[in-house]
Each structure stands twice: as C-alpha cells, then as structure tokens.
Amino acid sequence: MNESRVGNSVQILISAATLLLGALGLAYWANKAQNDRSAFVGLYLLFGIPGGLMLVAGLALLVNGNAILGTLLLLVGLGFTLPLIHGVRVGLAEVMPFDPDSAIDMSGLCIVLGALGWFTANSLAPMAANPPDVSEIPSVSVMELVVQAAAFLAIAYIAVGFPYWRDLLQATERLGIVVPDLRTIGMGLAGTIGAFLVAGLAGYISQQLNPDLGESLNEIVDTMTAQVQNPIGAVILGASAGIGEEAVFRGALQPRFGMVLPSLLFTMLHGPQYGFNVALLGLFGVSMILALLRKHVNTTAAMIAHALYNAVQ
C-alpha cells in the first residue's frame, strides 16, 4: 500500500510539473507571437493541425458507430480550431472582454474551448450518467489537494503573464487577489450563503425529478472526500479548491472571457464526477455567484466563499 501511495505521489508531481512547463512554454510562445508573424503562424499550426485531425477522426468514428470517442475528438477538435477563425473571435469580442487580434487571447480561448469540449464529452459518456458509478470515483488525498491547488495557482499566474510580461505584483493585481479586509470577508460570507441557497434549490429540483439522485450524489461526495473527512481535512479541501480554482477561473479567465464561459468550464470540470444531470445546473449557479463576487468585489472574496462552501459541505 505504501509503495502504491509513493508511486501515485510521484505520478502526481510529474503530471503537475509537466503541466506547468507546458503552460510556461505556451505563454512564452503566445507573447512572442504578439509581434512576431512567424510565431503567430506557429500558433495556428500548434492548434490547427491536432484540432483538424481530431475533427476528421471524430467524424469518422461517429460514422462508424463509436459515439463516445467520436464525440470526444469532435468537441476537442472544435475547441482547438474555432478560435483560429478571425470572424469567430470578432463575434466573441462582441459579448466578452476579448481582443480578437491578440495571440495571447486566441491561445487562451483555444485552451478553454478545448478543455470545455474534453470535459463535456466525458460528462456525456454513458459511465457518467445520472450519476457515475461510485466505484469509479477516486478518493482524493491531502497531497493531491495541495499539489492541485499549487498547480492551479501557478497556472493562473502564468496565464496572466508572469514571469514574461508582468512581474509578481502586477500579476497578483491582474488576478484580483488582495489582502482580505472586512468588506471582502463579509461579501465572501454572503456569497457562501448564496451558494448554499442555489445548491439547495438545485437539490430540491433534482429530488423532484429523480428521488434517488440526491442520495447517489452524497455517496459520491463521501467517496471523494473519504481521506479528508475531519476538521483539518475540511480546511485543506476548502482552501485548495477556493484558492486554486478561483485563481484560474475567476482571477485569470473571467476578465478576458466574461462570466459565463469560465463558469461553463468550471461546471463541466466537475461533470465527469457528478454526471450530466440537474446537479450541474446548481453548480453553474454557484459558479455565477462566485463570478459576481469577482466582478463586484475581488477574487479573494470568491476564494473565501468557495473555500467555506466546500469546507462546510
């Protein structure tokens, strides 16, 4: 058992390090492409070639009856390729604070839509339906939570330009992370209450539509949090999600892609865990409350609300 845990820990660290190196490389490339035509063309190749191949493969698989893999490749391929079309970017700029001529924004949109396609396809898969099999849900450890939070926080800083075109102080300001004052704490507490009200309403609706769903979802939460069901574990669980996820979704993404798209990605990130059902509507509602906190207060208030919500849950 100990050897298994050590091996799993090493795998987690290697995955996190690989992800961060990839983020650093892409950020450097995208920044260079702002003023370098060849680097800009290279971004088209970076996303266009795999995206195009995924589209072709996805359509072929769908025609041949492989709906699961075909849908996955098709949605991810669309996510990678649609932002490469200038007219699509111009259209999106009408509804979100997005620069259609920015190589950085284009790259970010490719990643966001590609990830959205990936998680949506996995949420639609039969094994994720109403809700997934509890035996397929892994239990998270304290180390996994800490590494995940650190990786998300680092990615958020990289996404807004650290260490290339913003220093640490500028990146922190861009992310909306501040030292909490009384107003920030108070709004975070209010956001927590609002999140529970929205989640409670979604739970009531799901109970009416599917009486067994609530019990199944509770079982999933219990399984996922089996290793951290104690006061210290609850604090770590809440803080890891609150700090890491909010830094990315509300801090880094929302100022460029608006409130809705990051909230959709946030919701579908949890889709494979909870299944494609009405519970996701409640999660989307919670995400929008966090988005409102980011918009009208700061990211720290959203972090407080998210952390308290998860810890109490």
Image (spheres, rainbow, N blue to C red):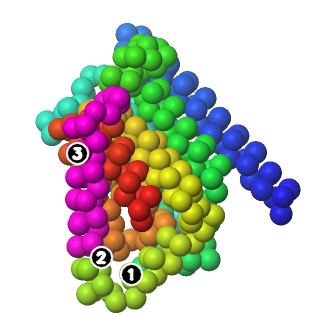
For this rendering, which residue is in front, 66 or 79? 79
Q: CA distance from mark 2 to mark 3?
A: 24 Å
Instruction: Write down the region rendered in magenta.
Output: 175-203
- Give the structural element (helix, strand or loop) at label 1: helix
Q: Position of residue 3 (x, y in %)?
A: 86, 56
For this rendering, which residue is in front, 237 or 184? 184
Q: CA distance from mark 1 to mark 2?
A: 7 Å
For this rendering, which residue is in front, 81 or 204? 204
The chief SS type of the magenta part is helix
Pointer 1 or 3: first along the chain: 3
Q: Amino acid at mark 2?
A: Gly
Pointer 2 or 3: first along the chain: 3
**Quarter of the image that includes the N terminus:** bottom right
- Answer few, some or many: residues within 10 Å of disc 2's Cα (few below 14, many 20 plus, some between 14 and 19): many
Residue 14 vs 167, above or below: the answer is below
Pointer 1 or 2: first along the chain: 2
Question: Tag on residue 214?
Answer: 1
Instruction: Specify whether residue 13 is painted magenta.
Output: no
Which quarter of the figure has residue 297? Answer: top left
Q: CA distance from mark 1 to mark 3?
A: 29 Å
Q: Position of residue 228 (x, y in %)?
A: 59, 61
Residue 24 vs 84, above or below: the answer is above
Proximity of marks 1 and 3: CB atoms separated by less than 8 Å: no
Q: Amino acid at mark 3?
A: Met
- Give the structural element (helix, strand or loop) at label 3: helix
Q: Position of residue 12 (x, y in %)?
A: 68, 47
- What residue sits right under mark 2 in the picture? 203
- Answer few, some or many: residues within 10 Å of disc 1's Cα (few below 14, many 20 plus, some between 14 and 19): some
Instruction: Specify whether residue 177 is painted magenta.
Output: yes
Proximity of marks 1 and 2: CB atoms separated by less than 8 Å: yes
- What residue sits right under mark 3 in the picture? 187
